[in-house]
Amino acid sequence: MRETIRFVRRGQIVETGAVEPMTTLLDYLRLTEGTTGTKEGCGEGDCGACTVAIGRSRGGRVVYEPVNACIQLLGMVDGCEVVTVEDLAEGGTLHPIQQAMVEKHASQCGFCTPGFVMSLFTLYQGTESAVGRDTINDTIAGNLCRCTGYRPIVEAGMAVCAGPRDDRFRKAGEDTAGVLDFIADHRDIFIGDEDHFFAAPASIDGLAALYERHPNAVLVAGATDVGLWITKQLRDIPKIIHLGRVRGLDGIEDTGREILIGAAATYASVEPHAQALDPDLGELFRRIGSKQVRARGTVVGNVANGSPIGDTPPALIVLGATMELRRGDRARVMAVEDFYIDYGKQNRAAGEFVTGLLIPKLREDQIFRCYKVTKRFDQDISSVMGAFRFTLDEQGLIREARIAYGGMAGIPKRAKGAEAALQGAGIRDAAAWSKAFVALRDDFAPMDDHRASAAYRAETAHALLGKALLEAAGTPTERTRLVGRREGFVHAAE
């Protein structure tokens, strides 16, 4: 067992045991290290002012991802390289990203600038050829600026990513990867005592034993939600168990018939598999949080969190996904929809945790659709999330309808009345659609809150079901959507 964390800063190995469970990476950088170029803005991973790059060794090279330092725990960077805006310039020469920001007049007050620079830095490192405006926009969707209007920032990103990549981070890539491999080990990390600790087990058995002994500890995968418990809710969390070092828990396996996703697999790593399963699922993943959130947040964390407005549960429910849970040396499997009991209450015993998900792939006779409705397009929580899967027979009759919504009840929930109304109906049977719309009103009693009124939610749920049926009946999505159109994607059921 190790009582320290180790990471790389500016080519040097940093090893420290001074790790409080709730210490964030941002606080370490600003208060301990004194590198104040990384700014604190919203404190919840929304504005991107605190963005830093986290490098990991993968296949003999370093892969950099953007991370919100304000909601990342210091202990989570064990085995990584941490790069901040102060590290980019070499001597008196600005990094190409910084130089492009100057030349394009992409900074005014400058508060948000370090975060934009670091987001674009990860894009610069992660691509080889020129990138388009849409890619730049997606990269900086998690960074807010109230001065420049974004145009010069986008132009700076496009300019610097138009040519060959050449900086000292690329040149030192193999050496840095070697250092990261050197500090990696398979020992459990435990810093503190039995009443107050940060722990990062290295094996699934070690995790199970530790959590069974400390069922009141908080499990953290990406901290994209737990981080806000600390920064916004000001909770006291004396025991934290990080899942990110458990060997194999970040695994993703495509068996041909289903996709297996480990509890530590991030949105970013799962996104291409989601896109391959269905473009609507891929578009949903692209709109979850920001690049910074998707780099650290996990799919299983989104499910296990139990939020009634979580993005993925409705889609996973209609796809028939199952989850594996473990407590000690005992494991069990349940359907995702059976995990949710009531608001804030899940079907999980003390000391029991989710190890992974199994998502069946769509069959040729199945049509899937999902839609996320939010107040703003990028980086927002759903007001209503709707997911639909229709299984058709050879005559075009609906053999099975699975419909689930988020934001319509205290838990992600199926619309079983609407499902029953569509059972056996033709996919173009307008009379059956009317019955389903009526039944949908009785399936849910949504509430008013600051995100949407009950009336708005009910009307939106009705509209999403209508859109799904229209598209399943053959209406092209160029007529039903502004973004995420499916033209060009060939599904055997269509």
Image (cartoon, grey):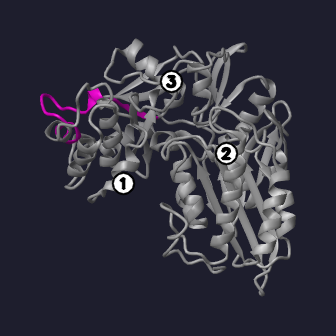
The structure residue drawn at horizontal position 55% and vertical position 66%, both measured from the top left corner, is 480
Mark found first going from the N terminus, 1 or 2: 1
Q: Quadrant of the N terminus?
A: top right
Q: CA distance from mark 1 to mark 2?
A: 32 Å
Q: Position of residue 360 (x, y in %)?
A: 72, 64
Residue interval drawn in magenta = 80-99
Relative to the observer, which residue lies in front, 411 or 305?
Answer: 411
Mark found first going from the N terminus, 2 or 3: 3
Identify residue for label 3: 74
Identify residue for label 1: 135
Say which amino acid is labelled 1.
Thr
- Is 378 left or right of 112, judged from the image as shown? right
Is the residue marked by circle 1 packed among few (<14), some (14-19), or many (20+) residues within 10 Å? Answer: some
User: Is 396 covered by the magenta stretch?
Assistant: no
The structure residue drawn at horizontal position 52% and vertical position 60%, both measured from the top left corner, is 272
> Which secondary structure, mark 2?
helix
Say which amino acid is labelled 3.
Leu
- Is 245 left or right of 70, judged from the image as shown? right
Q: Quadrant of residue 223?
A: top right
> Which secondary structure, mark 1?
helix
**Mark sitting on residue 456:** 2
Relative to the observer, which residue lies in front, 348 or 177?
Answer: 348
The answer to whether the residue labelled 1 contacts the one labelled 2, judged by CB atoms less than 8 Å apart, is no
The structure residue drawn at horizontal position 78% and vertical position 42%, both measured from the top left corner, is 409
Q: Image height check: is 265 above or below 371?
A: above
